[in-house]
Amino acid sequence: MTVTTKRATFLPFSRPSIGEEEIHEVVECLRSGWITTGPRTERFEKEFAAYVGAQHAVALSSGTAALHCAYWALGLKRGDEIICPSLTWPATANMALALGAKVVFADVDRATRQMDPSSVRKLITRRTRAIVPVHFAGAPADLDALREIAGDRMTIIEDAAHAAGTEYKGRRIGSHGHTAIFSFHPIKDMTTGEGGMLTTDDEDLARRVRLFKFHGVSRDAWKAYGAASTARYDTVMMGFKYNLTDIASALGIHQLRKLDAFIARRIEIAERYLAGLADVPAVELPAAPPYPHRHAWHLFTILVENRDAFMARLREENVGSGLHFEAVHKMTLYGRRARKLPATEVVCARILSLPLFPGMTDEDVDDVIAAVRRVAG
Ligand SMILES: Cc1ncc(COP(=O)(O)O)c(C=O)c1O
């Protein structure tokens, strides 16, 4: 059905899907007398690890905190280099910089927007410690190609902030044998308000991250306050305060149970966009990566000329949109020594994200398609 007039009400670019189960669990948590890290967080960690197929999951206060933990656990330090895409949120780079490492930015493939392994290969030096793919928009980066480049000398840390529920070659992100980090920010496919998770198969790494995330204190506070314990504790190393609260985990437990249904609806919406915009020459649609995968459709991005004006015109049509992302290598913090990344620069100048969340109706999607077609004129 063709929509000929603008929407009556504003459609945001994203809105979390919070149901009665989450509300009930948060209320139960509030009534329980234990609201910070405790039994609900322990349950959330176990269920998340089982869902993604990792041996260990450590719940953290954000995806950024999870990146800091992952880079720290690798022993990243001054003189080391990591390679990540510039098409990402600054956290991917900033947390390596926080440890004194140098961030080297790789280019992306313009059509799939995933980090381009051929660009990564050219940037390897003897100082490269880690390759950090971002599973952009919820599609997987090409892990096999990157693993081949990394060999035994370099580590892969997966920035899976967009990729809870994403599959690469038949297996979920988190089960590919690398440390992976996830974000539960409200626009993500599942949310805890703010929050993150680090997954790994390395028991010792998980143990060290558990210390690092809580002042190097060698026992959990909720166990220390419990009836059968002593109040004594020790700090065995320097650490931060990155624990996730039980209030947040109460949300996460139920969001995780609904994640596959959320993704199924996101796939329907994305397919409706792909069909509805296929014949608009002014709009460059995202291409599917050429290897087997399940796309979690965190974002539906398009490329257009005059992006800022396009976004303003969409807003006049009562359609929200998002900008994911500004090129990190061009930012003030990194820009002075940046090399050129031709595909990233085109993508970041033109990219915008259309509304995509499970609560959208087909009519909402058709409104967006009609608005984009009008603006693309
Ligand atoms: C690619 C990417 N990495 C890392 C992060 C950081 O996650 P958080 O916002 O939970 O700290 C984000 C957040 O949006 C992201 O998009």
Image (cartoon, helix red, strand yellow):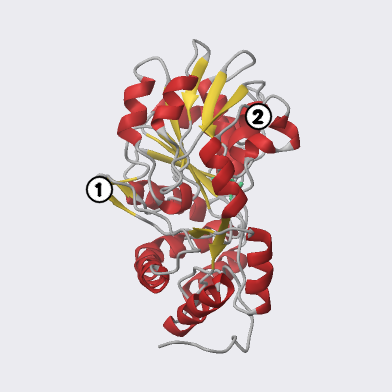
The percent coordinates of residue 204 (x first, y second) are 43, 25
Using a 10 Å C-alpha cutoff, classify the residue at mark 1 as few (fewer than 14 neighbours), some (14 to 19) or many (20 or more).
few
Q: Nearer the viewer, residue 54 or 289?
A: 289
Q: Is disc 2 in contact with disc 1, using a CB cutoff of under 8 Å? A: no
* Residue with the mark numbered 2: 239
The percent coordinates of residue 375 (x first, y second) are 58, 73
The percent coordinates of residue 1 (x first, y second) are 40, 88
Label 2 to label 1: alpha-carbon separation: 40 Å
Question: Which residue lies at the image location 56% right of the left edge and 55% below the top edge?
Answer: 351
The answer to whether residue 130 shows anywhere in this view is yes
Residue labelled 1 has its Cβ within 8 Å of some atom of ligand 1: no
Compared to 22, does 128 lie above or below? above
* Residue with the mark numbered 1: 292
Which residue type does callout 2 highlight?
Answer: Gly
Query: In terms of secondary structure, where does tag 1 sit?
Result: loop
Left or right: 261, with 88 as reference point: left
Question: Which residue lies at the image location 68% right of the left edge and 60% below the top edge?
Answer: 308
Which residue type does callout 1 highlight?
Answer: Pro
Residue 81 lies in quadrant: top right
Compared to 27, does 239 lie above or below? above
Q: Nearer the viewer, residue 371 or 230?
A: 371
Q: Residue furthest right?
A: 332
